[in-house]
Amino acid sequence: MVKSPEQEHPEEALGWAARDASGHLSPFKFSRRATGEKDVKLKVLFCGICHSDLHSVRNDWGFSTYPLVPGHEIAGEVMEVGSKVEKFKVGDKVGVGCLVGSCASCDSCHDHLENYCPKAIWTYNSMYHDGTTTYGGYSNVMVVDEHFAIKFPQNMPLDASAPLLCAGITVYSPMRFFGLDRPGDHLGVVGLGGLGHVAVKFARAMGLKVTVISTSPGKREEALQRLGVDAFVVSSDINQVQAAMGTMDSIIDTVSAVHPLLPLIGLLKNSGKLVLVGVPDRPLELPIFPLLSGRKIVAASCIGGLKETQEMIDFAAKHNITADIEVVPIDYLNTAMDRLAKGDVKYRFVIDIGNTLKEA
């Protein structure tokens, strides 16, 4: 007999879930497993709203299962630890990102790249080892294997640090792996949104020259004056694009909408790299001749492993890097999703779970 979400596990939980592809979210009672010997149980205090959450609740990618509790930018406080937990104690600041499990035996797992494990278990809309559905951080409590928990240094504010667990590692990992982090190099950042503004902050901390490439002229002053970038290019302005042709060592493209790659490839120097981290809902067109003529590379990256995620958080703490956020109560969630779909946020919504998610 199939058990209801409330009956699957012994620990009561409350969250907000989408029930269908309309994406509308509402209160949802379910359950979490008891704290195992290697588990950390945390009280969720904040959860960022990622663009992936929006795609998932609306089934834009075609593989959502309902009810769906989103949220993989989770920050909170340790409530309980299992008998064999070594990294955490009660009261620690703790985070959970996009992953809650993997096979632990493949090459990717051995290389600390659990994000590329063929049996990776995602924080929501996935199936756990025991066959039950994973539910995300739009909820009051989480239970996670300590390997998949991230420790926040005490100086980091949990609300503005939560988005780093997805947005932060999504840009940090390719910047390190593809060598986009060499001091003095010129990095282009496409899109000044949730991912892009964090990429700018990391790039500046790494000593790079930074140009923001955006469709929004209205973001110029914000980018130049407040975020301190070196230049701003409006991608629809032919003259501005032409003036920047062949000047960039690398580009990180954070845009999740369908957009042309040809102008971006033209901005690269010979042997330059264009790294995609956004996930458009339709395929992009990739012209080959511009790549051949300059020995240019187009690559992509998906979040990062747990070891690198902890490294990223520690780097952010050292350089006082956090996301720019708008904190909202849980009952504002559907409005926030609609605003996110319109790009109306600077730059990340974060839900105040601890103070506003209450049982009716």
Image (cartoon, helix red, strand yellow):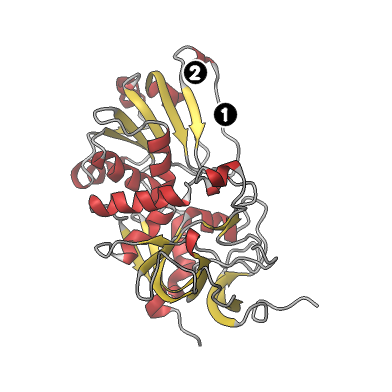
| Residue 344 seen anywhere in this rendered image of the structure | no
| Residue 227 seen anywhere in this rendered image of the structure | yes
Among all residues in the image, which is located at the extreme top?
293
Residue 191 falls left or right of residue 65: left
Indicate whether 34 appears above or below 149.
below
Residue topped by disc 1: 285
Residue 216 percent location from the top left of the image = 35, 41
Structural distance between the alpha carbons of marks 1 and 2? 13 Å
Residue 37 percent location from the top left of the image = 54, 72
Disc marking residue 3: none
Residue shown at 45% from the left, 79% from the top: 357
Q: Residues within 10 Å of mark 1 (few under 14, many from 20)?
A: few
Foreground tag (1 vs 2): 2
Give amino acid for label 2: Leu
Give amino acid for label 1: Glu
**Which image quadrant for residue 132?**
bottom right
Residue shown at 66% from the left, 62% from the top: 129
Indicate whether 212 appears above or below 325.
above
Of the 4 image quadrants, the one containing the N terminus is bottom right
Residue 28 falls left or right of residue 259: right
**Which image quadrant for residue 355?**
bottom left
Indicate whether 32 appears above or below 87.
below
Identify the secondary structure beneath mark 2.
helix
Of residues 274 and 190, the one drawn nearer to the viewer in this rendering: 274
Among all residues in the image, which is located at the extreme bottom?
360
> Of callouts 1 and 2, which one flags the residue occurring earlier in the amino acid sequence?
1
Residue topped by disc 2: 291
